[in-house]
Image (spheres, helix red, strand yellow):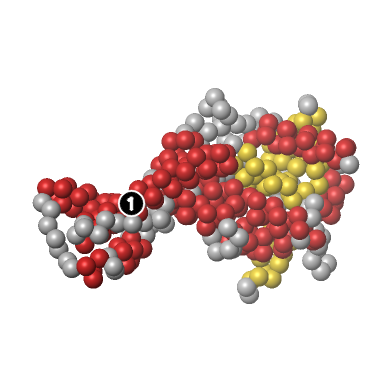
């Protein structure tokens, strides 16, 4: 209970100070919760610092309110006077609550993260993954009419050129940086420029669109194999959006890894649950750089991933 002998002004200021203090305590608790359960979502060398920065993200209007309240508290401690009668003392919390709601006191970067992690389907990540699935993967991975699916096209290629594929799936790279080079380069890999998989055509939005998947030769334990691999083009487009001043926002940059993780999980879930795309595609999620700052060789990443796939298949 607030002291009834205080003036309305002091009551309102005291209530606002307590609400702000409660919000700060909640955010500190949220920081520790975030570090405990979601630390892997943040940069390896700046986890706690980034989490703290997200936790103490405030709107400018809220910072202005804090300044005004601070100045008011200092003034009231210097000059104490009665401002309003006892009736106003009963309703002083209402305008304070409206003001705090108006300045969105509870808004932080965690709210953006929570929105991305939710199952609303309205965030950037699920939008990219859904468009990627319906606009490309589901059109090219399964068999459509008389046109072969990805597995049959791989089998035809292997038979025609007398080669062995490491996996009969389309492998999609999902790098931590979001960026995949036009040609995937590695000492262990070489693109077969003149020999891609047989193409397919799909009628899409009034256009007969061609789809072609490139083939790479890769050395695994000194033995040559072949794979069809490409980068996740929606993430490359997102990378471009982050680095273009007309489309980039601080929220997009702050939530870069959250969006990438949600994109990967959401797309993986669709591919595994939709019968036509099960075991047709393999998502390769990896960091571009090692913990010591060395750039990852994408060929080594693929070799390790393929070996893990072989081991898992042997256990079944």
> Where residue 258 sits in the image (x, y, percent)?
54, 48
What is the crowding at mark 1: few (fewer than 14 residues within 10 Å), some, or many (at least 20)?
few
Q: Could you tell me which residue is drawn at 57 percent across and 54 percent down? A: 117
60 above or below 50? Answer: below
Q: How many marks?
A: 1
Q: Identify which residue, 251 or 177, lies in the foreground.
A: 251
Q: Secondary structure at mark 1?
A: helix
- The quadrant of the rendering that contains the C terminus is top right
Tell which residue pokes out farthest to the bottom in this image: 206
Q: Which residue is mark 1?
A: 18
- Where is residue 80? Give x, y as percent: 13, 53
User: Is residue 295 found left or right of 192 in the rendered image?
Assistant: left
Asked if residue 27 lies left or right of residue 222, the reply is: left
Residue 278 lies in what quarter of the image? bottom right
User: Where 14 sits versus 311, above or below?
Assistant: below
Residue, x 54% and y 51% (percent of image)? 259
């Amino acid at each position: 209970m607030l002291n009834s002998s205080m003036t309305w002004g002091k009551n309102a200021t005291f209530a606002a100070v307590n609400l702000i203090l409660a919000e700060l305590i909640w955010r500190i608790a949220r920081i520790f919760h975030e570090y405990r359960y979601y630390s892997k979502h943040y940069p390896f060398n700046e986890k706690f610092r980034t989490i703290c920065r997200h936790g103490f993200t405030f709107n400018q209007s809220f910072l202005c309110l804090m300044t005004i309240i601070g100045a008011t508290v200092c003034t009231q401690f210097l000059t104490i006077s009665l401002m309003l009668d006892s009736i106003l003392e009963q309703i002083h919390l209402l305008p304070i609550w409206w003001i705090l709601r108006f300045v969105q006191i509870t808004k932080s970067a965690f709210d953006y993260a929570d929105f991305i992690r939710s199952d609303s389907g309205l965030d950037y990540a699920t939008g990219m993954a859904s468009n990627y699935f319906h606009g490309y993967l589901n059109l090219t991975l399964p068999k459509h009419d008389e046109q072969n699916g990805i597995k049959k096209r791989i089998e035809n290629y292997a038979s025609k050129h007398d080669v062995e594929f490491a996996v009969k799936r389309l492998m999609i790279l999902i790098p931590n940086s979001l960026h995949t080079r036009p040609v995937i380069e590695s000492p262990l890999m070489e693109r077969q420029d003149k020999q891609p998989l047989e193409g397919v055509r799909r009628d899409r939005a009034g256009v007969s669109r061609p789809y072609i998947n490139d083939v790479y030769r890769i050395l695994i334990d000194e033995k040559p194999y072949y794979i069809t691999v490409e980068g996740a083009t929606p993430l490359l487009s997102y990378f471009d959006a982050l680095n273009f001043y007309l489309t980039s926002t601080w929220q997009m940059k702050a939530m870069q890894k959250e969006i990438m993780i949600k994109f990967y999980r959401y797309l993986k879930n669709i591919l595994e649950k939709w019968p036509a795309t099960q075991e047709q595609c393999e998502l390769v999620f990896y960091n571009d750089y090692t913990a010591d700052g060395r750039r990852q060789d994408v060929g080594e990443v693929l070799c390790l991933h393929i070996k893990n796939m072989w081991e898992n298949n042997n256990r079944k």
